[in-house]
Image (cartoon, rainbow, N blue to C red):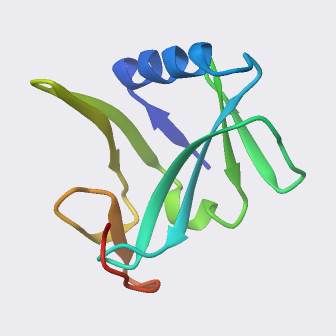
Amino acid sequence: MNIDVSEIAAEKIAEILLTAETRHSFLRVGVEEGGCRGLSYTLVLDEQQTEEDVVFNKDKFRLLVHTKSIPYIDGLEIDYEQSGMIGGFTMNNPNAKASCGCGASFRMANYRGEVKKCD
């Protein structure tokens, strides 16, 4: 299991975690059903690690991934792109067979998830 984080994304994640209410927060990376392609990425701050989490120790922070999300995001590359006044995290997933235009939702060859209209 591997998740790569670009240098600029790592800097942004570390910055977000430093401004969080607690310095012991993790960034939880996962997948949930929904989105226009059926599966959507989740990136949330979390303070609690469970026995079902895999921890990835990066230089300045730690990522948590629930074991249920691993088959969907093994090999995921997280980057951060800035365009004018707007910036955000991008996901490059080698497991995705189709992605939506905004990159937040994807479909796999053997699992489509539950397609829902994007907010």
Which of these two is toward me, 12 or 116?
116
Which of these two is toward me, 17 or 11?
17
Q: Is residue 77 left or right of residue 27?
A: left
- Return the residue found at the far left: 84
Q: In the rendered view, would you say 22 is above or below 48?
A: above
Q: In the rendered view, would you say 14 is above or below 35?
A: above
Corner quadrant of residue 57: top right
Residue at 46 percent across and 83 percent down: it is 113
Q: Is residue 63 left or right of residue 23?
A: left
Query: Residue 52: x percent and y percent?
Result: 83, 57
Q: Is residue 59 visible to us here?
A: no
- Return the residue found at the far right: 51
Residue at 36 percent across and 76 percent down: it is 107
Query: Residue 54: x percent and y percent?
Result: 75, 46
Query: Residue 80: x percent and y percent?
Result: 31, 30
Q: Is residue 99 visible to us here?
A: yes
Picture quarter with the C terminus:
bottom left
